[in-house]
Amino acid sequence: MTCSNCAPIEETRTIFSTGRLAAAITMAKEAIRDGILQEVPGGPMSSVIPFSDLNPDGPWDDLLRYRFRCKTCAQVFLLSAETYHGSGGEWAKEAG
């Protein structure tokens, strides 16, 4: 469940283009800057490039996987994308 702090970013967003991926990266970076989210370990499939070094305009790893936690309610969000074949990805709340 999200709170009023992270509600503006809770919507699931399907990533089917480089523009959508750039927008999702920018949104997450702004949420971190604004103190809404903090990055948390991405797990065994996490990306090689640290999120803080990730440029919204690329270049990107073939697989992106980043996790973020709301600083208020602890809801976890996942940003994932497969960029090599262009099969897309998503920004979504992590089930838990």
Image (cartoon, grey):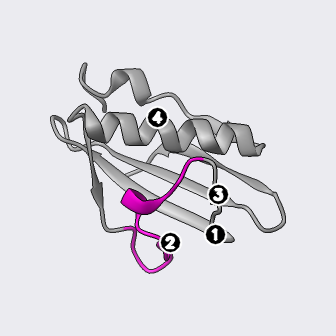
Identify the secondary structure beneath mark 4: helix
Q: Marks 3 and 1, how far apart in space?
A: 6 Å
Q: Amino acid at mark 3?
A: Ala
Do labels 2 and 1 touch, CB within 8 Å?
A: yes
Q: Marks 3 and 2, how far apart in space?
A: 10 Å
Do labels 3 and 2 touch, CB within 8 Å?
A: no
> How would you rate the neighbour count of disc 3 (Cα within 10 Å): few for under 14, some for 14-19, many for 20 or more?
many
Q: Nearer the viewer, mark 3 or mark 4?
A: 4
Do labels 2 and 4 touch, CB within 8 Å?
A: no
Q: Amino acid at mark 1?
A: Leu
Position of residue 51 measured from the top left corner of the image (x, y, whole percent): 41, 60
Identify the secondary structure beneath mark 2: loop
Identify the secondary structure beneath mark 1: strand
Above-or-below relation of 49 to 26: below
> Going from the N terminus, do you reach mark 2 or mark 4 first?
4
Q: Which mark is residue 81?
A: 3
Disc 1 designates what residue? 63
Identify the secondary structure beneath mark 3: strand
Q: Which mark is residue 47?
A: 2
> Going from the N terminus, do you reach mark 3 or mark 1 first?
1
> Going from the N terminus, do you reach mark 3 or mark 2 first?
2
> Going from the N terminus, do you reach mark 4 or mark 1 first?
4
